[in-house]
Image: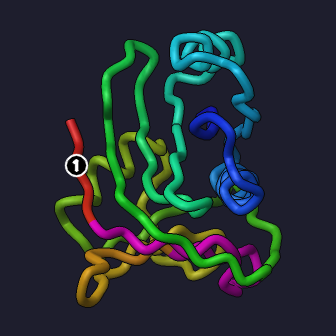
Amino acid sequence: MLITTSRKPSNRTRSFCQDLSHVLNAKYVNRGKMSFRDALLKSATLGFQEIAIVSQIKGNPSKIEIYNKNNELLLFLKITVSLLNLKGKINSDALNIRCEIEELKNPIINILKIPEGNSRKNLIWIKKGEGENKAIIEFYDKEGSIRDPRIYVKSWRFK
């Protein structure tokens, strides 16, 4: 997956995209003046089937839109993020997903192409949220320690 931003991203949004690309074994590309069409072409040139566009409000990441190579929206997430500078290495070849929200499980697994698993190492854990946060996405490294980013999902929509 190629990850990029909306135009003129803040440092916080760029940092979030870089962290997200590391945990998902994706590639982050600074968008610059690329149009959405150019970003799709860049994604295809690099051999990716999906592209994630991260947008911001007041300098903070606020939504993630994942499109396929045919410009079809696969997943929309309205989010807030927490970046606490928690670093760790994730073995992307052993990455698995645990999802507590049945409605999200299959779409997320199919889009990210990451198998379901129960290990607490090399894990993307989608937990049920509370209040306005419908879900919380956490990442665990190869040692089983939590690492950045933590994503709070306020709403979602998918194809």
* Nearest to the observer: residue 94 or residue 60: 60
Q: Which residue corresponds to the image point at 68% horizontal and 74% vertical from the top-left?
A: 148
Residue 121: give x, y in percent of width and height. 64, 77
* Nearest to the observer: residue 69 or residue 55: 55
As drawn, which residue projects farthest toward the front? Answer: 58
SS type, badge 1? strand
Q: Which portion, as a residue range, is magenta?
A: 138-154
Q: Which residue corresponds to the image point at 53% horizontal and 31% vertical from the top-left?
A: 51
Residue 104: give x, y in percent of width and height. 26, 59
Q: Which residue corresponds to the image point at 71% horizontal and 75% vertical from the top-left?
A: 141
Q: Residues within 10 Å of mark 1 (few under 14, many from 20)?
A: few
Residue 5 forms part of the magenta stretch: no
Residue type, numbered disc 1: Arg
Left or right of 40 on screen, residue 142: right
Which residue in the protein does label 1 denote? 157
Residue 17: give x, y in percent of width and height. 67, 52
* Nearest to the observer: residue 33 or residue 152: 33
Residue 138: give x, y in percent of width and height. 53, 76
Name the main secondary structure of what is drawn in magenta: strand
Q: Quadrant of the N terminus?
A: top right
Q: In the picture shown, does residue 110 fall above or below 97?
A: above
When asked about the image quadrant of residue 89, the answer is bottom right
Left or right of 111 on screen, residue 43: right
When asked about the image quadrant of residue 68, the answer is top left
Q: In the picture shown, does residue 68 fall above or below 153?
A: above
Q: Which residue corresponds to the image point at 27% horizontal and 51% vertical from the top-left?
A: 106
Q: In the picture shown, does residue 9 fall above or below 57?
A: above
Q: Quadrant of the C terminus?
A: top left
